[in-house]
Image (cartoon, helix red, strand yellow):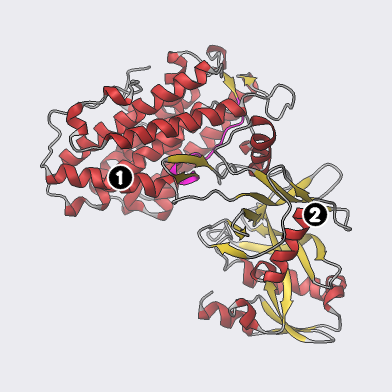
Amino acid sequence: MNQKDKKLYQEETFNYESDWKDLMKNETFIIELKEDILENYITHQRWYGAKSSTLKYIDIIDHFKIENEEGDCFYGIVAEVNFKEAFVQNYFLPIGLVDNVEYVDGNYITQLKLRDQSAYLVDALLLESFRKLIFQKIIEGRKDKYPNIEYRKGRKCETQNYNKSKFLRVEQSNTSIIYNDSFILKFFRRVYIDQNPDYEISKYLTNKGLFKNTPGYSGSITLKFSDKNVITLALMQELIPNEGDAWAYFMKNLKKTFFKADELNETGDHLQKLKPFDQISCNQIDENLLSFCDKSLFEDVEKLAYRTAQMHISLGLERISTSFTPSAYTYDYTVWLKNRLMYMLDNRINLLENSLHKLDGLRLELAQEILNKKKYIKKRFLDFDEAKLKSERIRIHGDYHLGQVLVQDRDFYIIDFEGEPESTIRDRKVKQPPIKDVAGMFRSFNYAVYSIVFTYQKEFKLPLENLSHIADVIYSNMVAVFLNTYINEVQINNLNIGYYKEIEFLLQYCLLEKAVYELGYELNARPRWTIIPLKGISNILNDHTYE
């Protein structure tokens, strides 16, 4: 928290003739919590996901005590944030009380004067006493004395005493705590009145799917919101020792590749880009490419494809629970898909039209091309015909890219099954073609390759034209190696992803969807990077191989 924010919270002290353990019964406190305290705090947090929207009011839709027999007492609050744009978001905030802000490094919500003390209201996750209490409740694995809150112990959780905990400080939307260097407990800040997909899939893959290359389900905290609805507040999993995520790992190796090509003055004139969706093994890669691009890069792609296939095979195993059983393509799914994509496309086209002033050079040329072809893009999306598809839909990762994969000893571990941030909780649970995850990873490969070109362009001696050609060659080989391994593995294990023409159609379709989705983020956050999704869309539109 910066000094400006600290000052904001110090401007007012709230007085109540109540004790801490009875404070949530105080109507005046509840009103001031909703109308004054929470708005000042929540809107300044990294995990607050609506900074571009206008807040209307905040309501408290549920709260509960989190306490133990030793007298430690905290509250869990579910706040409903209402916006003038006519939508709502729910956020979870555990709160506690301290008498000295040094305990929380000066990061407090507001100052309170209660009947028996003067203290500071804080996010309870900052307090080790709260983190210890939560861990002990999950390890005990039983219902709390408050009937609407349940602490569950998972299969991958051996009983152990609390030793230590620390924050994992790399997240935006959630807050994670590492316990005993053995478990990671993710608190979902933005919550939904439904089971979180990350919780559902993690539990399924551990208990039924038997997929080993993902953190094992170790526990959870669930709030029973009504007779038929629950809210997943937190998910605990095994802590996977790792060297970082696959994005940083591949970027390091790709950077080395491009600088070696530049050092060798490799123009790429004798290198040929593979056709879209060719399939090759690592042993079939052009020796000229391997002269500056280490074969290990493609071996890593091969291993990642194998782990991706194993994930999908596990997600397609279920034959009892309707939440996970594979499903055929239906008319209802097609209607849902087209409505969703038409809404997204209209949003991106409007955003692109209003952002042309931010673009120049090739970015502007590609943007104009896409605006001129918007009817064609719409037609490509509307050409989806469920009657022609014989493969099956399953629960998938939904937001699959290199940042969602951890690396350890040249092996890969897949994490974070929450789904696309823009999608509703219901949409994230719709069964989709597993090829959509494959397309997401291909778009991530594309980002990684071209990020090196555009980030280090001024440091290379080679002109952009040569660098772009080399990038196309490397990317096409990464895709070909991945597809070769992935398709062979899923077909051997009887996951129905369709025949080659169907696979190619779904890949083209999902790649276009992903690139259009990415365009919105880049236009809003970093217009310079729009070159990557714009070029991706253009390449798909101009490739008529599989029409």
Circles 1 and 2: CB atoms closer than 8 Å: no
**Residue 121 falls within the magenta-colored stretch:** no
Q: Amino acid at mark 2?
A: Glu
Q: Would residue 377 appear left or right of 454 to someone viewing this image? A: right
Query: In the image, which residues are magenta?
Result: 394-404
Q: Would residue 196 appear left or right of 404 to someone viewing this image? A: right
Crowd rating for badge 2 (residues with CA inside 10 Å; few <14, some 14–19, many 20+):
some
How far apart in space, not on screen, are marks 1 and 2 (Cα)? 44 Å
Q: Quadrant of residue 419?
A: top right
Which numbered disc covers residue 140? Answer: 2
Whether residue 338 is visible to the viewer of this picture, yes or no, is: no
Please state the horizontal and vertical placement of residue 47, each as a whole percent of the image: 58, 60
Circle 1 sits in a helix, a strand or a loop, which is it?
helix
Q: Quadrant of residue 45?
A: bottom right
Asked whether 444 or 534 is in front, the reply is: 444
Which numbered disc covers residue 319? Answer: none
Q: Which residue is mark 1?
A: 253
Asked whether 211 or 422 is in front, the reply is: 211
Q: Residue at x 53, y 57 (%)?
A: 171
